Image (cartoon, rainbow, N blue to C red):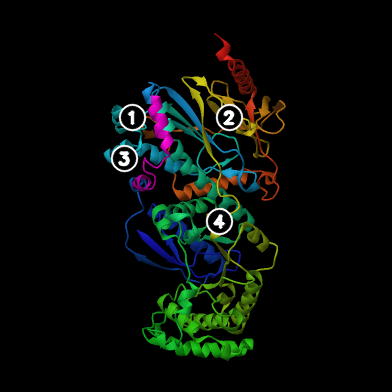
């Protein structure tokens, strides 16, 4: 079912926070009960007298895996790929090579945003895509119309029967911290099929991993005490970009989203306040209807909220020495109308006209009226100007009102800040005095303005059991041949310090045993390293048409992300000028690369051989 939990900010700001309007969509009632119990226990430790109220309305249960798979088919249909995938597949089929066993790897070449790490995301959708991969009659007819007329009609019959039952996928676990040049996924199977998968898999992994990594950087910049709200749907690159952003920014460390569809599909907490348009739509107190509110304590008498608020407004102006003539009547009308609609969840934006001369005064008057009627208003949103300075001024007024009117909870009302927040401005918040409890981030988060693409690539590494390697005039674009195992080396404190790529047939490295290896980039001189612990990063997640590992929920993947980031050494997760993480190949793999390079040089004279 849906649960709408209403929270009052009854604990000291900004050490803790509960969402101002939070929709919980839990997989089980046990999880929901545990979540709510934890929230109530936090509140009881900080403010024993505050009550938690909640309302319930009926709705369908959480989307099943089948529903998510249907969503994948709609968002990533089989034709969502590049035309040359089909022309290559036809050429393979025409030459009888389409069923040759082949292996591709998916990886990226540089860590994003100038940082020291990335986060692997999107595998969940990749698995659902593989399981549902199939061409319809309509798909095949369209391909018949766009491929050259000379294409053999039998090829379209081949496509119509194609699926991923012969494909095997090995992958780094989703939510794991990953580094440049480490293969995230190994896709093996019939050559034509695994070639056709390239674009779709890249599409599913590239942006998901990029925006998840961006969210993690925002979380590191914000610190752990501040809550983060993703609100970038309107600035995202289309509906699917917005939905993907909401999902994976939550995985990366954000606490909630404004995107209702993301909450519905992925169980992400959904939150929101009000827009300036709501405030400016009112011009007079005559527009407030209804004008009365019943007290929360059960008294059935209707209280004239306008009269009550006018009385409080006079007392607030007198207390603060404010000029009542500068207060905007329409703004007060908007606040009253919203408070009557949501007396438990009153959190308006207060900068539509003037924060100090109107918005803050109107809020305090309405909030004090709600407190008198035993409701618990939540706080305010600031959306322009110097957020740090304004938040300090607002908190000062909250504390003053709390003291003068003997309402302890008033001093800890929430202050939400939203105003084109970037990673840099988020970091600056920690350097300046401020009282912001919640930060809303949109454009710079979902559009990844500092780097719009992760640059994942999908490269062939083996055909018919023979390793394949791409050479390039740019050495950075060369690939590492052969099927591989990937191991993470940990130091004595459990921090990863090197990822090792080995050929699959090599024995796994062991803890406390020296290993000789060669870094993939930079100084490629042979090194000897001795790990205190060794972790294998590869799991078989899909084979014979079946997903072979349990699919994690969005919340579970989020927990994995936070645990994985915690293992990083501080020098690798610094936002500015982090130390480079070493990715290396085993000595045997290094020798294979040298042999292939030498063989390629010898084969370049094949025209002169006869």
Image position, residue 395 (x, y; %)? 62, 75
Give the prevailing secondary structure in the magenta stretch. Answer: helix
Query: Are circles 1 and 3 on residues that touch, CB within 8 Å?
Result: no
Q: Quadrant of residue 165?
A: top left
Residue identified by numbered label 2: 479
Q: Taking the image as drawn, is residue 548 in sight?
A: no
Residue extent of the magenta highlight: 69-92
Relative to 65, residue 286 above or below: below
Residue identified by numbered label 4: 445
Going 35% across and 58% down the picture, which residue do you hit? 1
User: What secondary structure is found at the residue carrying circle 1?
Assistant: loop
User: What secondary structure is found at the residue carrying circle 3?
Assistant: helix
Disc 2 to disc 3, C-alpha distance: 35 Å
Residue identified by numbered label 3: 142
Query: Are circles 4 and 3 on residues that touch, CB within 8 Å?
Result: no
Residue identified by numbered label 1: 151
């Amino acid at each position: 079912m849906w649960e709408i939990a209403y929270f009052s900010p009854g604990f000291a700001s900004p050490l803790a926070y509960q969402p101002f309007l939070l929709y919980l969509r839990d997989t089980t009632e046990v999880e929901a009960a545990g979540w709510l119990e934890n929230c109530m226990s936090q509140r009881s430790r900080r403010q024993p007298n505050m009550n938690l109220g909640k309302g319930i309305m009926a709705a369908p249960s959480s989307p099943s895996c089948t529903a998510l798979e249907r969503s994948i088919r709609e968002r990533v249909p089989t034709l969502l790929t590049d035309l040359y995938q089909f022309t290559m597949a036809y050429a393979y089929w025409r030459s009888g090579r389409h069923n040759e066993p082949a292996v591709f790897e998916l990886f990226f070449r540089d860590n994003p945003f100038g940082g020291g790490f990335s986060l692997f995301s999107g595998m969940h959708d990749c698995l659902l895509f593989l399981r549902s991969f199939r061409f319809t009659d309509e798909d095949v007819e369209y391909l018949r119309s766009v491929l050259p007329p000379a294409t053999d009609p039998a090829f379209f019959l081949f496509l119509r029967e194609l699926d991923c039952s012969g494909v095997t996928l090995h992958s780094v676990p989703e939510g794991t911290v990953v580094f440049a040049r480490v293969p995230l996924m190994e896709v093996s199977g019939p050559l034509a099929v695994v070639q056709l998968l390239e674009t779709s898999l890249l599409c599913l992994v590239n942006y998901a991993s990029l925006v998840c990594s961006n969210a993690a950087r925002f979380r590191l910049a914000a610190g752990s005490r501040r809550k983060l709200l993703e609100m970038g749907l309107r600035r995202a690159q289309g509906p699917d970009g917005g939905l993907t952003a909401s999902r994976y920014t939550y995985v990366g460390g954000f606490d909630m989203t404004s995107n209702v569809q993301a909450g519905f599909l992925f169980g992400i907490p959904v939150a929101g306040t009000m827009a300036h348009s709501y405030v400016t739509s009112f011009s007079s107190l005559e527009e407030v209807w209804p004008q009365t509110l019943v007290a929360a304590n059960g008294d059935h008498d209707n209280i004239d909220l306008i009269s009550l608020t006018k009385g409080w407004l006079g007392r607030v102006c007198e207390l603060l020495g404010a000029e009542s003539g500068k207060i905007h009547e329409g703004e007060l009308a908007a606040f009253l109308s919203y408070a009557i609609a949501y007396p438990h969840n009153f959190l308006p934006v207060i900068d539509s006209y003037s924060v100090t001369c109107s918005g803050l005064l109107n809020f305090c008057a309405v909030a004090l009226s709600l407190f008198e009627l035993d409701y618990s208003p939540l706080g305010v949103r600031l959306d322009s100007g110097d957020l740090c300075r304004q938040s300090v001024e607002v908190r000062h007024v909250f504390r003053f009102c709390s003291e003068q009117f003997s309402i302890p909870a008033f001093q800890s009302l929430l202050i939400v800040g939203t105003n084109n927040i970037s990673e840099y401005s988020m970091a600056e918040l920690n350097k300046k005095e401020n009282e912001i409890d919640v930060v809303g981030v949109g454009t710079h988060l979902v559009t990844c303005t500092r780097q719009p693409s992760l640059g994942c690539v999908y490269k062939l590494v083996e055909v018919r059991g023979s390793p394949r390697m791409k050479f390039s005039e740019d050495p950075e674009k060369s690939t590492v041949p052969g099927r591989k195992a990937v191991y993470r080396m940990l130091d004595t404190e459990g921090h990863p310090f090197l990822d090792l790529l080995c050929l699959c047939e090599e024995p796994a490295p062991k803890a406390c045993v020296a290993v000789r290896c060669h870094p993939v980039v930079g100084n490629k001189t042979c090194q000897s390293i001795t790990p205190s612990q060794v972790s294998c990063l590869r799991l078989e997640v899909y084979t014979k048409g079946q997903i072979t590992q349990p699919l994690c929920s969005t919340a579970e993947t989020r927990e994995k992300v936070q645990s994985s980031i915690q293992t990083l050494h501080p020098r690798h997760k610094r936002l500015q000028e982090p130390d480079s993480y070493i990715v290396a190949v085993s000595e045997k793999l290094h020798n294979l690369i040298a042999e292939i390079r030498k063989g390629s040089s010898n084969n370049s004279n094949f025209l002169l051989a006869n």
